[in-house]
Amino acid sequence: MEKFIVMGRTRLEGTVRIGGSKNAVLPIMAASLLTSKNSTIFDVPHLTDVLTMKKVLEHLGARVNFTSEVLEVDTSGVNRHEVAESLTRQMRASNLVMGPLLGRFHRVRVSHPGGCDIGSRPMDLHLKGFQSMGAAIHERYGFIEVEANDLHGAEIHLDFPSVGATENLMMAAVLAKGQTVIRNAAKEPEIVDLQNFLNGLGAKVKGAGLDVIRVEGVTSLNSVEYTIIPDRIEAGTYMTAGAITGGDILITNVIPEHLEPISAKLRETGVTVTEYPDSVRVQCAGRARAVDFKTMPYPGFPTDMQPQVMALMATADGTTVIAETIFDNRFKHVDELRRMGANIKVEGRAAIIKGVPRLSGAFVEATDLRAGAALVLAGLAAEDATIIENIYHIDRGYAQLDGKLNGLGARIMRVNNHR
């Protein structure tokens, strides 16, 4: 196991480039299973989760080549409809192969997925949608089996705008007979990216980014070349890193419109955010002001940025109330921030933070992906050194976080625990 040693009181300055979106590339990799032709995907980040999804595709019979941020997928040899339990438990996004496999082979078997332990994320919305399309569901021995000899279009209303359910149902509908209408669909930019990829294959999908998505089933698909959108959560993390260190950072290869919920909240804290066509500049002089916020489905404030901005609020001037409305167990980083001197009280799904002038270095543990990023940011602003363990969580969603931050003036060492 590796860990980070983060030296504190470091002001970040310079330019950093954002890579392709983790939350876009994983469903797009899964969607490549819909066709027997080749898919070439550009700007793919080197993340542990991407490598896990690569293993999932290879386990199913695909041939995958991944070099220099280019992923080439040949799915002509895919001949399995069951994902190994060892892979499914590593990453929740592995459940995204269900829709493509059901559409192409009319059956799929997976174990209940794993991933970050940030609260209940049931599969019921996915399965109810599949049932509406004519599938039979069997859950036994920890596995989910879905079969549909006659997969057909349907009217589906999601009880909650779930990103994963929206993506899975979009993909299942591509090869189904007739039209599928998904109402109360998730609106995230990654949904739009998936639609664009599917249409590049020859699918007929429209409405992504709106409440209602319509998919007209087709009988065959083509090969495609596609470039992934930039990662708005990675960008937001560097924006917050600039704010918490009183820095001046230019963040390139972004879509500023995707960052608007984050930019607006940072501006409320007194941070200067300047937008350019494909970049944003973050400047912060002095201590940030405390502001309240709550996580919401897009275009609201993203739950994946809550831990990082909580770290900023831990050092802000005043008292902050954060309401977490998406996940019921996404405050595990609170105890770790407290070890660093943060004054945080949790009441149900709300956290009350009284900002302190300075955090102090400590031994802490990354409990999940975004919590790990929050601890790195807190460590950059703290007195002395912070040691962060279990950084494999961080590597799941950030490519070379330590290297990119060091390029901005941070002092972060990656070391092996056995040394």
Image (cartoon, rainbow, N blue to C red):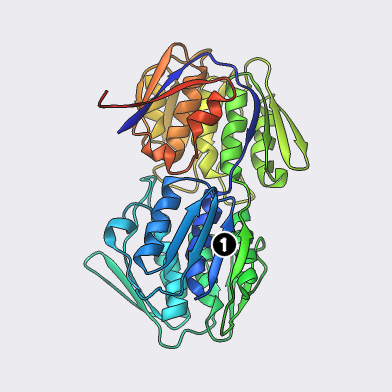
Q: Which residue is mark 1?
A: 40
Q: Secondary structure at mark 1?
A: strand
Q: Tell me residue 114's x, y (percent).
A: 34, 53
Residue at image point 51% right, 29% down: 403
* Residue visible at 64% across and 71% down in the picture: 199
From the viewer's side, name the closer residue of 65 and 183: 65
Q: Quadrant of the C terminus?
A: top left
Q: Is residue 223 shown left or right of residue 92?
A: right
**Image quarter of residue 248:** top right
Q: Is residue 121 visible?
A: no
Q: Which of 62 and 163 lies nearest the eye of the viewer?
A: 62
Query: x, y (%) of residue 173?
Result: 53, 76
Question: Alpha-carbon neighbours of circle 1 within 10 Å: few (<14), some, or many (≥20)?
Answer: some
Find residue 85 and report its horizontal and vertical position in percent.
28, 60
Residue 232 visible in the snapshot:
yes
Please identify the quarter of the rendering in which residue 244 is found.
Answer: top right
Residue 321 vs residue 142: left or right? right
Q: Quadrant of the N terminus?
A: top left
Which amino acid, mark 1?
A: Thr
